[in-house]
Image (spheres, helix red, strand yellow):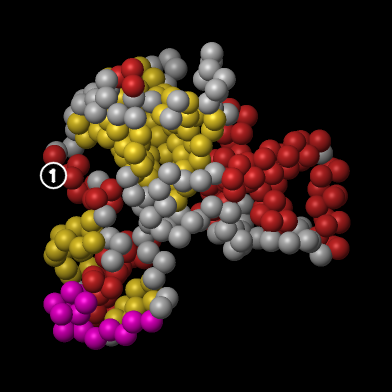
Amino acid sequence: MRRRDTDPSSDAIAPDNPDDIAFDWVARLDRGALPAEEQAALDAWLASDTRHRGAFVRAQAIWLSLGRARALHTPRPPTIMSTAPLSQGRRHVMRFAAAAACAALVVPGRSQGHEHVWRTTVGASEPVPMAGGRLILDRDTLLMGYVADGRPLETRLLCGRVRGDWTAVRSNAPMMKAGQTSIFPAAASLVVRQSARVTEILVLAGAVRADAGSQVWSLGTGQWMRMGDGMPPRSGTLSADEMYRRTAWSRDTLELRTETLAEAVAILNLYNHRRIVVHGAALSAQRLVGVFRLSDPSAFVRAVCSILGAEHVESPDKIDIF
């Protein structure tokens, strides 16, 4: 059930997972002391059900762990523990964190490691080096890892999309969990995407084994699999050209093949804090062909204005195209 994006103290909240509501309260408390009436509402909610207290404790623990975590690479301003109100996207991230709270990363027989958190909101991460390979996180991604002796032994994708490139042998590549699926890469490149109820795997090169409990699949170069959402698993094969296009985000690339200016701007605005605003329906409908840097909206706008004969005005937080 999807809950409306509303004040956690409001009576209009629809019945939902207590973890989801608890994170709303924790986020609000992080911004400062609650007004008396909201504190009373929180106290009443905690007292109404013992499950609410458990959810609240879990939310606090995860929130604090995210605040302490230091990303290995931070190509853009840090986004962990923002003091701004939770967006719907962030609530989505925290909902996955709540779901994973009771299934923390624990590797049997090892007690010298620690958990690590990688998090992105706007824009993809720079390559994160790991033993035998690297990871790149797409926007709005939350990944947790169990790290020992300087390398991850296991990672869990809670939400978002990750590209992994592993040159090591199978024994050195960390297992990744996404949803109910365990993923074992050999010397492989792959992309894993996790949404609310769906896990998707695309193998760019090499071989990957996917274990969903009662079923095991072996995927090779170009093969993809989609599972979850109450549907039977589906699979197929992509061409090298289509794989290259679908992974453009991991190379900081926007590749346009007759997309409209409005469509291109919508993508760029997902990856940059500086927004592009196009004025005029006719201009928005103009189609473009070319390759641009995803993280450089200013260069994109200059090129587009040159091509289309348009004008632009830049300010610190946005770029207007006329």
Give left or right: position of 128 versus 6. left
Check if residue 163 falls in the magenta segment.
Answer: no
Residue 216 image position (x, y, % from top left): 35, 17
Q: Which residue corresponds to the image point at 45% horizontal and 25% vertical from the top-left?
A: 149
Q: Which residue is mark 1?
A: 241
Q: Secondary structure at mark 1?
A: helix
Q: Is residue 290 above or below residue 3?
A: below
Residue 210 image position (x, y, % from top left): 35, 22
Q: What's the magenta region? A: 302-315
Indicate the quadrant containing the N terminus: top left, top right, bottom left or bottom right.
Answer: top right
Give left or right: position of 105 versus 307. right
Quarter of the view holding residue 190: top left
Q: Is residue 134 above or below residue 249?
A: above
- Circle 1: residue type: Asp
Q: Which residue corresponds to the image point at 13% horizontal and 39% vertical from the top-left?
A: 240
**Residue situated in front as seen by the camera: 276 or 147:** 147
Residue at the front extreme, as displayed: 149
Give left or right: position of 88 versus 60. left
Indicate the quadrant containing the C terminus: top left, top right, bottom left or bottom right.
Answer: bottom left
Residue 281 image position (x, y, % from top left): 29, 79
Check if residue 303 falls in the magenta segment.
Answer: yes
Residue 21 at least partly seen: no
Residue 277 image position (x, y, % from top left): 35, 76
Q: Which residue corresponds to the image point at 55% horizontal and 40% vertical from the top-left?
A: 96
